Image (cartoon, rainbow, N blue to C red):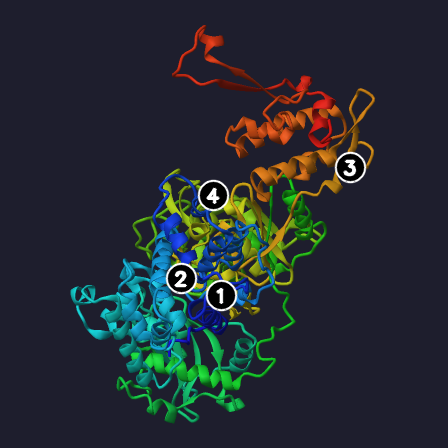
Amino acid sequence: MSRYCGEKIVEPILRAAQHWKEVGLLSDSSIFDRGSIWTLPNLEALDQHFVNQPDEGEGSFFEKLEVQLDPTASGVKQLAAEMLWLMFLCPSNIGESKKREGIKSIWEWSGEAFPEDSEWIRDGVLGGVGSAGTSFNTNRWRELVFFIRAMIAFKSLTNQERNRFLSDGWEFAQWLEQVPECDARQLRHMLLFLLFPDDFERIFGGTDRRRIVRTFSGKSAAQVRNLSALEIDRNLLEIRKQKEEEYGTKELDFYVTPLRDLWGDARVRTWLFSWNPSNWEWESIADDREATHEGRTVTHRWGCANKDASTGDKAFLVRTGEPPKGIIAIGNVVSDPYEAPHWDEAKAEQGKVYRYVDVAFSRIQDPLQNDPYITEADLERITVDKQEWSPQASGIEIKQRSAGILEKVWEKVVEAAKQPDDKKRSGSVKVALNQILYGPPGTGKTYQLNRLVEKYSSRKQSLSRDAWLIQELLDARWFDVIFGALYDLGGEGKVNAILKHEYVQMKAKALGRDRNIAQTIWATLQAHTRENSSTVQYKNRNAPLVFDKKQNSVWSLVDDWEEECAEQVEQAKKWKAGPKQEASHQRFEYVTFHQAYSYEDFVEGIRPVQDEETGDIGYQVVPGVFKRICQRAKADPDQRYAIFIDEINRGNIAKIFGELITLIEEDKRAIYNDAGFLKSGMELTLPYSGARFGVPGNLDVYGTMNTADRSIALLDTALRRRFQFKELMPDAGVISGSRGDGYIEDGDGGVINLRALLEAMNRRIRFLLNRDMTLGHAYFINVRDFSGLREVLFNKIIPLLQEYFYEDWHRIQLVFRDVGPGGEKLEPQIVCHDTLNEEDVLGFDHDDFEDLTEYWIVDPDEITPDAVRKVYEESA
């Protein structure tokens, strides 16, 4: 049945539609209980003033509609508001408050108060059931024209005909076809879903409707294009019935897995990984199970026979070998396939490798702890694709239909297993804070940020050796690290000894690498081997040439290494000595976003780097500020770290964060064990370096946002739902002036009330613009005399108002009360004006020219106390 819409709560919306059907369609009453509104005369008035008098000029939909409806009666305006209410029931890509605001605006044109306490405008009713697409908003007038025409036709029917059509969705749909542009209007699909949700889908876009029919029916694109909207509806119903029988459930929706995966743009594949306890002991399964039951993810490297697995694919884990057998875990693939030493230690010692992917498990069930799971018998009943459930190798693909059924079965298993406290978070780890401070200019956002900085600045703090060493090694070259390790080993050592050395291990930990370290050591040693070596044949050598290998594979420092590597020797001695006790350090990074800021600046990118010895230019992967602070936080898990992002809304969030935006979520934060390997949370593979990367749980992310640059409502959705938002608005009460009460001396024996001045200007700015562009108290916080006030007004306030009003000097005059109701001057002025006519300038009347108004700002020294006082003293 089409009533199922995944996570969307559809019942209040369908109840509202039923209410409209009873009071507005079968009767003529108001949805908001305000008398007879849905009448034929009111609809015909809308047809006359809106449909037949289109306004193609400038202005928004609401601005034009207000002018068009101005001559109509109050009931007509209220009907227009209620029709908009109906049009807003389905779209979920318009916020509830925005919907209420639009409905209320039209209603209040009638001169009556809007019924804000009505149950039919609550969030649950206005939440929406699916995206209506951009065209529904940009062509809203077309949808309303269709609605008006449809309602005129319906209200012209007899009562018997109305009842007949509203009792049979297919008859109603057939009748609706007579309304012009019926097939092209999204509202047509919305009306059918709202009135007949058991027969019609919540699919409002024509492209999706045709694609679904084409995917599931086998019809060609040309055949589907020739279908009418009603024929597509019948196809969709037939497809639904087939899938409900196939999956054994009526809880299916074309926008929800598994059906979505079968027709959507980016098909998600599903893989079956296997675990045989007889071959490998999963020592951490108890801890991993507990972590996933607390809502955290746990990432493990897992064998994968298929090289086609990719990041984002779904993963199921089947327990094989010994009973109990069956599906015990679900998750997502979070890396592309890679090769690493074989999981079997004996084969690994022989140099054999194995293909793996990293899997982030979101739920692990342990049958040995009496957790419900999908048994072997359950799997045998999923027979639609002849799917193999006991694979010979880990990492085989699960066919689409089997994957859909498996996911539905898993949902029921897990839901039955959940306890009331199953979703509670562990209290042992402090939750990372993601917070954005937002508000108009000058409201103290930077001040608050600087206060927060103090929390992450340790005056006297001893770092652990590991944490200190990792931070020291972050920016060190591999040559420096390998030289330091060999130097510390007494100048001689095999590759395995270098690999196990503290410096190399900490460098690998800092970079989040656990693969290919030995290869890096070999390549570095060979690249810096002396020219006349008898054991190393390597073409591309780089200075300094200070290594050589003996016949027994022992590497040593040779020739003039002490002179050529004096800097590295001092560095190695520093690393050996360790951190100085009570050394001060800052546990934060500070960055400002701008339009040109990129992922390569923030996370990592390839940069040209000049070799200090040869002067040659090469290209290396260089970590960005975010990656560096994450590496520092990972190395020092007992301390909290932070990154402060000023003007976060000025950057392209999707471009800067890339795939890492997911990793800052609370339940995706990475928790590492003592060895630096992922214990819980999520890591992804970075595209440039190929390194595994996670955002540590001890890193806090702060941002500031100037709402004058961009409304918070326009902020990237992905960012909005991952951050807490703290609003900072102008607070005149914190302005002290020269006396502590907000007043300053004006130099002429009087006083100026700075608090009243700010409040008066902001009241007018809110009226002329909006609250997001008001003036902050910080502009006046340090003003102590009238000279300082003049400087602030001339150099800060007036330039900001020029930007706000796009050089509309008349409005700037209104902010300062420099003009009266009729445009007359109110002396003394701050922003002055004069009017020039053609006779004064040209010496004669000329019909081609209008009067010219010129504006100018008085010099700072000419701003008088009375000019300022008149801003807030209304009787002046």
Left or right of residue 542: residue 695: right
Tell which tag, 3 or 2, sits nearer the viewer. 2
Q: Earlier along the polypeptide chain: callout 3 or callout 1? A: 1
Which of the 4 image quadrants contains residue 779? top right
Q: CA distance from mark 3 to mark 4?
A: 63 Å
Residue in the foreground of this view, choosing between 590 and 402:
402
Q: Label for residue 736? A: 3
Residue drawn at point x = 61 percent, y = 28 percent: 821
Residue 162 at least partly seen: yes
Tell which tag, 3 or 4, sits nearer the viewer. 3
Residue on which the image places disc 4 = 564
Residue on which the image places disc 1 = 29
Residue 113 horizontal/vertical position (percent):
59, 54
Q: CA distance from mark 3 to mark 1?
A: 58 Å
Residue on which the image places disc 2 = 131
Q: CA distance from mark 2 to mark 1?
A: 29 Å
Residue drawn at point x = 53 percent, y = 67 percent: 124
Residue 492 horizontal/vertical position (percent):
47, 59
Q: Earlier along the polypeptide chain: callout 2 or callout 1? A: 1
Residue in the foreground of this view, choosing between 793 and 152:
152
Identify which amino acid the numbered label 2 is placed on.
Ser
SS class, disc 3: loop
Which of the 4 image quadrants contains residue 464? bottom right
Do the CB atoms of the residues marked 2 and 1 lie less than 8 Å apart? no
